[in-house]
Image (cartoon, rainbow, N blue to C red):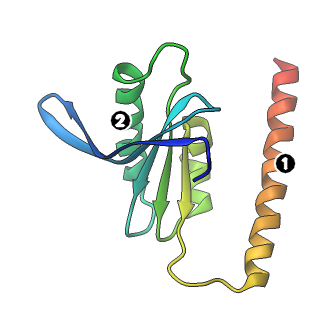
Amino acid sequence: MGNDFAFLARQKRITIDGRDFYIDLLFYHRKLKRLVVIELKLDEFKPEHKGQVELYLKWLDKYEKAEGEESPVAIILCATKSDTMAELLELDNSGIHVAQYLTNYVPKELLEEKFLSSIKNAKIQLEQRNKKEEKD
C-alpha cells in the first residue's frame, strides 16, 4: 500500500438506523489527509456496489472525519470490472474507484501495456481537469 497508509480497521462496524454494516478495510493516508475505504468483492463489479460504498463514505464523512481532513475516498477491488459501467456511473466524480485484482499471473508484455495505458489515461484526465479549472 505504501509508506503513507495507516491501517485503522478490518470489518469496521457502522450502525445506521439500528442496522449494522461492515467496511472491509479502513486506512488513513497521511499525505492525502483522508480516510480510504477498501471494499473487497469476489465477483464482478455491480452498480449496487457504488451505492453501498457511497453510504460508507457519507457515514465516515459525517461521523469519523476529523477537522482538517479531506472527504474519504474508496477503492472497490473486484474480480472483473467494466470501464464503461464505471464511466456511466461517474465513479471518478464520487471519490470511488474500481480496480480489478488478478487471480493469476499476467504476461509481462500485457502488464507493461496496461501500465503505459494507465499513465496515458491519467495524463488525459489531469489535462481535462486543468482545462476545466482554467475555465472556472
When asked about the image quadrant of residue 41, the answer is: bottom left
Decide which of tag 1 and tag 2 comes sooner along the chain.
2
Kindly indicate whether the residue at mark 2 contacts the one at mark 1 (C-beta within 8 angstroms).
no
Q: Dot 1 surroundings within 10 Å: few (below 14), some, or many (20 or more)?
A: few
- Give the residue at x 43% y 22%: 65
Q: Position of residue 124 (x, y in %)?
A: 84, 48
Residue 62 appears left or right of 21: right
Helix, strand or loop under label 1: helix
Of residues 68 and 95, the one nearer the viewer is 68
Q: Please identify the residue farthest to the top as the structure is shown.
A: 67
Helix, strand or loop under label 2: helix
- Give the residue at x 54% y 84%: 104
Circle 1 residue: 123
Q: Position of residue 79 (x, y in %)?
A: 47, 71
Gap between marks 1 and 2, in whole Å?
30 Å
Of residues 14 and 94, the one nearer the viewer is 14
Residue 23 appears left or right of 30: left
Q: Position of residue 119 (x, y in %)?
A: 81, 57
